[in-house]
């Protein structure tokens, strides 16, 4: 269950609440009965270990999400096709 933060508009107190996503938001400050406003706060969730973009994927090909080996193999295969067609025309006597 996520932890939500609320701040009272009257007294400024910040309240944390462990709630389900489906639970309705808190509306009344427990200290002064003022109106609560839900805060947007940073989380401390961080992906660690092998297999994540920051540690592995970006280092393998220099980042950007595209592989440079695909371009090289496509260029190699097109030049290989050209060489094969030239060889077949030479063998045919053209």
Image (cartoon, rainbow, N blue to C red):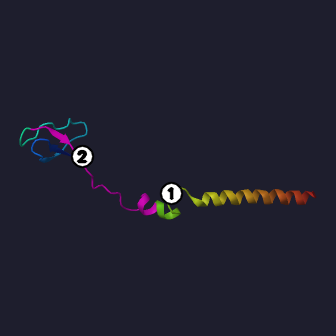
Q: Is residue 77 visible?
A: yes
Q: Name the secondary structure under disc 2.
A: loop
Residue 55 lies left or right of residue 35; in this view the side is right
Give the number of callouts: 2
Identify which residue is drawn at 56% across, 58% down: 67
Per the image, the residue denoted by label 1 is: 64
Magenta segment boundaries in residue numbering: 34-56
Identify which residue is drawn at 84% across, 59% down: 86
Query: In the figure, residue 39 lies in which quadrant?
Result: top left
Give the position of the N terminus as an image quadrant. top left
Position in image of residue 90 (x %, y %): 89, 60
| In front of the other: 28 or 77 | 28
Residue 36 painted magenta: yes
Residue 2 painted magenta: no
The CA span between labels 2 and 1 is 32 Å
Q: Name the secondary structure under disc 1.
A: loop
Identify which residue is drawn at 17% across, 44% down: 6
The overriding secondary structure of the stretch rendered in magenta is loop
Question: Compared to 10, does 65 lie above or below?
Answer: below
């Amino acid at each position: 269950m996520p932890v939500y933060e609320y701040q009272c508009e009257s007294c400024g107190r910040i309240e944390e609440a462990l709630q389900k996503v489906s639970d309705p938001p808190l509306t009344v400050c427990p200290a002064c009965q003022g109106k609560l406003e839900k805060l947007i706060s940073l989380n401390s969730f961080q992906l660690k270990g092998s297999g994540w973009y920051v540690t592995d994927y970006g280092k393998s090909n220099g980042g950007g999400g595209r592989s440079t080996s695909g371009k090289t193999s496509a260029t190699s295969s097109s030049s290989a096709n050209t060489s094969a067609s030239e060889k077949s025309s030479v063998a045919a006597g053209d």
